[in-house]
Image (spheres, coloured by chain):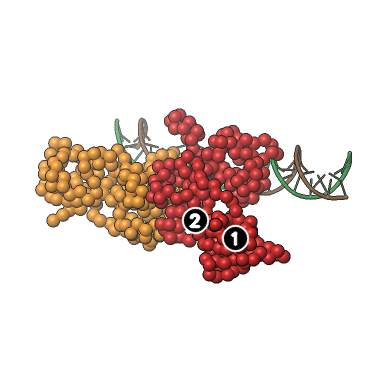
Chain colours: A orange, B red, C brown, D green
DNA sequence: TTTATATTTTAGTCTAATCTAAAATATATT
DNA sequence: AATATATTTTAGATTAGACTAAAATATAAA
């Protein structure tokens, strides 16, 4: 009985703790290493006071280094937990799209639940079943068993010069609104594009899609699509 | 904001509520319709006082009819929720065995977690992906979208007369100990057996497995294996 | 450098789910 | 029928996680 309690407190994290760690991880990747209380609160749709409580708890568990008013930084241990959750989230998203034929804008909510299923055997076998994918349906890299992942250059359409050719590799904004917009104008990961014109006045861009159709995208769109340049 | 709260309180059940409802359902199938506080407590490894609290809550939600000292009975609404959880549990078990190559004694714990993933779209697509299976890896029937399932005759090896031939169709005890024992003596679902001798003094039975090997099984084993008779 | 605003923390409540110990009720035994 | 035992319920406490309101601190503006 004693044993079980000790084991749980050492190895298990609650659903909620995992969500906080993942939120801190995602914020620290997008913004700076140090993550503010408010940004975590916003990301998790909770209140700053709740975040403060949790930061104390995670600091006790050595998952973050935290000092009053200084924001939080993941420790190596915290990062490991966060990356494990991210790995699960992204593998499940691949499963949902590749095996169950969900669309890329339908999988996030479900993966938010599946990412907390606790079984390394399960996730390793799922990874194998899926053929060890390296990217999820939104182009985000999938950490392997050891937490390593491809980190391709994060180049946006907005960064491309006129005349350049590139392939769509990921989305920065993965809200279903944006994903549905992309689908409706015929943009998907793997799509080849060429920058025809950049209009300075509103930073909109006209692009050639798959060598055929010409469309115009707003700055908001070009700032949220990652590409890989093609020679 | 109001709306969301109302919706959640009407349609969503907590992980814990689902576990209680499933426990009551499983107990009422195995024993009697009316389920005692203590049996629920034992099944869920919790205390009777906790069960009493939850019965009040589930009675409020109209999932059980409950009167002090009288045990609990699932209402139609409660049964619907319970069967939905059972459906998810069993479909995930099929997935784990058929697609991820888990053994039948390894899947229960993981399915205990997966059964709480909340998405009917997900479970319906999973069911389709698996080819609409009717039984789980332990021979238990899988409820369909509407809660209907095959209920084959629950005949045990212990019920068979000498000389009868039958096919293994399910396990009553699905503990991993028992499942591993079965595997080690070459008994699996679908295995054809023939009752050679019934020894009255200890109720052990000698059976012919797949027309080849003869083995002897104890009463405890013959009382825990469901079969379908073959003419 | 003072003042105003924004951010973060603290203090105190709340709810769900659990527990222990004690009281109430039901069932079994003499 | 009276007594003993087992089951169930109540009362009261605890924990995780969340919230509100108020206090403390940091940052920006004047
Ligand atoms: Mn996602
Ligand atoms: Mn994704
Ligand atoms: Mn099971
Ligand atoms: Mn099963």
Residue C6 location, quadrant: top left
Q: Is residue A50 above or below residue B231?
A: above
Residue A224: image location, x then y, percent: 25, 44
Few, some or many C-alpha atoms within 10 Å of disc 1 (few <14, some 14-19, many ≥20)?
A: some
Residue A56 shows up from this direction: no
Residue A207: image location, x then y, percent: 14, 43
**Chain identity of mark 2:** B
| Label placed on residue A66 | none
What is the number of callouts on the image?
2
Residue D1: image location, x then y, percent: 89, 39
| Residue depicted at 64% across the width and 39% down the height | B72
**Chain identity of mark 1:** B
Q: Quadrant of the N terminus of chain B?
A: top left
**Position of residue B80 in the picture relative to residue A103 (left or right):** right
Q: What kind of element bears circle 2?
A: loop
Between residue D9 and residue B174, name the one nearer to us. Answer: B174
Q: Quadrant of the C terminus of chain B?
A: bottom right
| Label placed on residue B164 | 1
Residue A152 location, quadrant: bottom left
Q: Is residue B167 above or below residue A213?
A: below
Few, some or many C-alpha atoms within 10 Å of disc 2 (few <14, some 14-19, many ≥20)?
A: many
Between residue A215 and residue A15, name the one nearer to us. Answer: A215
Q: Nearer the N terminus, badge 2 or badge 1?
A: 2
| Residue depicted at 50% across the width and 41% down the height | B147
Q: Is mark 2 within 8 Å of ligand 4?
A: yes
| Residue depicted at 59% across the width and 60% down the height | B164
Q: What kind of element bears circle 1?
A: loop
Q: Nearer the viewer, mark 2 or mark 1?
A: 1
Q: Are marks 2 and 1 in contact (CB under 8 Å)?
A: no
| Residue at which label 2 appears | B137
């Amino acid at each position: 009985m004693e044993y079980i309690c000790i084991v749980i407190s050492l190895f298990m994290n609650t659903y909620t703790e995992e969500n906080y760690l993942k939120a801190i991880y995602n914020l620290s990747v997008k913004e700076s290493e140090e993550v503010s209380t408010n940004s975590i609160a916003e990301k998790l749709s909770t209140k700053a006071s709740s975040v403060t409580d949790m930061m104390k708890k995670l600091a006790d568990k050595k998952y973050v280094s935290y000092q009053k008013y200084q924001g939080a930084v993941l420790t190596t241990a915290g990062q490991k937990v966060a990356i494990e959750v991210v790995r699960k989230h992204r593998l499940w998203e691949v499963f949902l799209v590749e095996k169950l034929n969900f669309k890329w804008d339908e999988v996030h909510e479900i993966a938010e639940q599946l990412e907390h299923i606790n079984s390394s055997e399960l996730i390793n076998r799922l990874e194998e079943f899926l053929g060890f994918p390296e990217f999820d349906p939104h182009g985000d890299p999938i950490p392997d068993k050891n937490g390593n992942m491809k980190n391709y250059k994060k180049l946006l359409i907005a960064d491309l010069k006129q005349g350049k050719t590139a392939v769509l590799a990921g989305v920065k904004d993965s809200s279903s609104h944006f994903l549905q917009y992309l689908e409706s104008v015929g943009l998907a990961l793997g799509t080849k594009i060429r920058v025809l014109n950049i209009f300075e006045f509103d930073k909109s861009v006209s692009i050639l899609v798959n060598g055929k159709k010409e469309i115009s995208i707003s700055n908001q769109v070009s700032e949220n699509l990652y590409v890989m340049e093609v020679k």
